[in-house]
Structures are given as C-alpha cells and as structure tokens.
Amino acid sequence: MFDSLTELIEKISLGEDATIEFKRTLPHRNSLADEIAAFANARGGVILIGVDDTGEVIGINRHELDRAEKTVVEICQDSIEPMLLIFTEKLRIDDKNLLKIEVPRSLFVHKTANGYFIRQGSSKREMPTEQLARLFQSRSQARIIAFDEQFVPNTSQDTLKRDLYQRFITEGAITDDMEDLLLKRHLLVKEGQQSRASVAGILMCHDKPDDYLYNSFIQAVYYRGKEKDANYQIDAKDFKGPLDQQIIDTMRFVYRYNAVAARKDIGRIDFPEYSMRAVFEAVVNAVVHRDYSKTSSKIRLFMFSDRLELYSPGALANTVTVDNLRYSQATRNELLARLLSEIALDDDMGKQVIRRHFLERRGEGVGIILSESETLSGKAPVYELFDEELRLTIFAAKPFQYKAN
C-alpha cells in the first residue's frame, strides 16, 4: 500500500483517513496494538511513525528508528491475539527518518488487551457486540486457509534457500519456472502482485526460521535430578534450523542422555530409559501440530532423572482431546505434514525409529508413544493441557525393568 515514495508523500499531504494514521513518536505499546489491530480488523492500512497529526514530517533519529521497528514487531507477536504479521519499512523523506508500518487486512479477528477495535474513518473504534459477531461470521470461512499457508511479511523468493526447497521440487521440473513451482507447492504465496514466502516455506526452507517467526525452534535441557534447577542443569541447547534438522538435533540430544543398561548373560541386551522410536514420534508430533501463530513460547523438551517432558504451544486441533488423542487424527498444519512426509531419514536414524520418512501419516504416532513407553517403564505416558499448551510426560525405565512379552 502506497508503495512508491511519491504516492506516499501525496497521501501524507491529504491527511489521515481510513487507510493511514500518523504518529509523531512511538506510542505506548497498548495504544499502538489497538491501532494495528483496528486496521487488521478493517481493510488494512499504514501507520507512519515520525509524522505529526497535521501531516508535517518530523522524523525520528536512527536509534529511535531501530528501536521502534523492534518494538512494533514485538507488539504484533505478544500484544495482539492471534499474532499478526505486518510489514515494516524504514524511509527517508526530506532527509528525515520515518517508519512505515503496513498492516494487511487479516483473515482473522484480532484482539488486544483493551478489546476488539476496528478502523472507521480516521480513528479507531471499539466494536459493539453486534458488529463483532458479524465480523467473526464473515471471516470464519477464511479459516480454511491454514496458518502454515499464509504469507510472511518482508519475504520473497530469495528468502527461501535453494538447497532446502529443491527437496520438494521433482527433478524433472527444475528447469521450469521456479517461482511458479514454489507457488504450486505453497512454499511461496501471492500477496497482491508480490510472491512471499509462506509460513511453511520459512519453517522448512530457511536456515533460521526464528528470524521471521519468533520462537519457531526447539529448546532442549537436561537436568541431573527431578526438578528444574539451574544448579543441576547439565546441558541446554536451542535448535533453530529448518524443522527437519531441528527434529534430528533434538533426537541426538535425547540419545546422548538416554541412559542404557545392558545384560550380557545371553548375548548383549540393551535396556534404554526411553524408546527412541516413541521420542521421535513425540517430537515430530510436536513440530507438526504446534500452533505457530502463538509466539510467546517455543517447543521445549526437558529431561530429568525420572522422566522426559515435551511442551508444544497451542490447544489441540478441532475435536481432539487428551482423552481421545490415541484414536483421533486432526492435523493443524497440513502443509507442514505433507512436506515432512516427503523427506527421507538417513539409514541410521531410519533404523533407530523404524521408518523411512519423517512422517508416515498413518495415524499411529500416539499409539507408538503410549505402548512402547509403557512397555519400557511400566507407566503410561501422560498428556495434559495447560493454558493452550500441550505437555507430554514420558517416564524413564529403571535398569532391567523391561520384561519381554
């Protein structure tokens, strides 16, 4: 919106309206959250930081410009629900610095700490119940466009790494128009006339997804004891590559600390604390089913002396509950699931987890987690939901506890 500098200058001269808002300095976080959400709930618009209410270009210094951009991104991630993806651009007009915040019309209805707002004319208004109900109804159909297929602002085809996206392009198609191929695979999506990287494209085809999608990584910590205590923390890692690499790195971490006892009376028989096959299923499920629109937390894996805990942000999808997880199948991120099902595991990992691809899509994952873990430890794993975050607890087997059927 207002892509050329000339068009933007002309728009400033005409003053604020339903599509543009001026701010002399960066407003209070909650106030700015209300303004951004109001545009997203309407037809979208632009907020300019460094322009007076009268349309005079005041500008902000370079340090304030950088701070303002960082703050705006944080507000969209932490102070607006669901998270809102926006564009930011640093500009110079009359030798003065401005921050342009472009807010697209959203597929969802957004809320701030102060309520639901919508842009009307040159100001925001809190929506009355009837208007809010109509807006929810009108945008409910848009929810068929999954979050992992939505575009990520400030990205392009060049954001995706060739060596990563070529995994999803058939060999004979490499000579065709690459942009068109990436659009067909939904690694790119159209936003107006521009091609932008999709959420799934960033997660699978960028070496640092966290640069664009905050907290889109796995954190793993190992404690020597039964509690989270920094004094007994032995190791901690953040795995931030493409999702398939995050899974592999997490599995290596668990393998390193998966204590194995052995009997040698009749050959060598190993007795690990955890079934690596069960852990693999759990980590893959967490990656595929987490809600990437929730950026306040990341996937977290904690290993203790008696258990392993895995946290995944987001409530369960559709009608799935913790009680029917074993028998229900609902995928929050269908595109991610499809992409992971196309990537083959190397021979060592494939033998360890008894599968060829990261995702087999047979609906057996939860059953494997429950049965293999209970066979080892004698205790069934536990799924629990806390404030729209799913926790899986797998109990460690004690040495020689396993009994063959």
Image: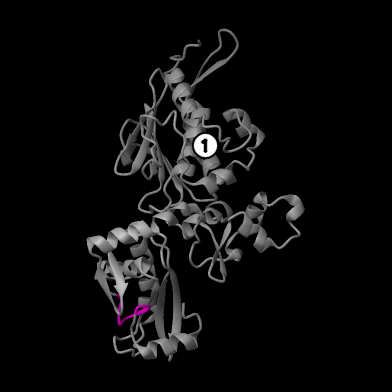
Is any part of residue 83 visible from this angle?
no
> Could you say which is closer to the camera, residue 127 or residue 30?
127
Closest to the observer: 258 or 308? 308
Q: Is residue 21 magenta?
A: yes
Q: Is residue 337 above or below residue 73?
A: above
| Residue 82 is one of the magenta-drawn residues | no
**Neighbours of disc 1 within 10 Å: few (<14), some (14-19), many (20+):** some
Q: Is residue 156 visible?
A: yes
Expressed as whole percent of the image width and height from the top left, the position of residue 294 reads 38, 52
In this picture, which residue range is highlighted in magenta? 18-26
Residue furthest to the top: 265
Residue 266: quarter of image: top right
Q: Of helix, strand and loop, which one carries label 1?
A: helix
Q: Quadrant of residue 90?
A: bottom left
Q: Which residue is mark 1?
A: 251
In the image shown, does 346 or 2 lie closer to the viewer? 2
Query: Is residue 41 left or right of 178 when viewed as pictured?
Result: left
Spot occupied by residue 344 in the image (x, y as percentages of width and height) = 64, 39
Residue sitting at 36 percent across and 72 percent down? 67
The total of numbered circles placed on residues is 1
Considering depth in this image, is 150 or 391 the residue closer to the camera?
A: 150
Residue at image location 33% in from the left, 64% down from the top: 75
Residue depicted at 57% across the width and 30% down the height: 353
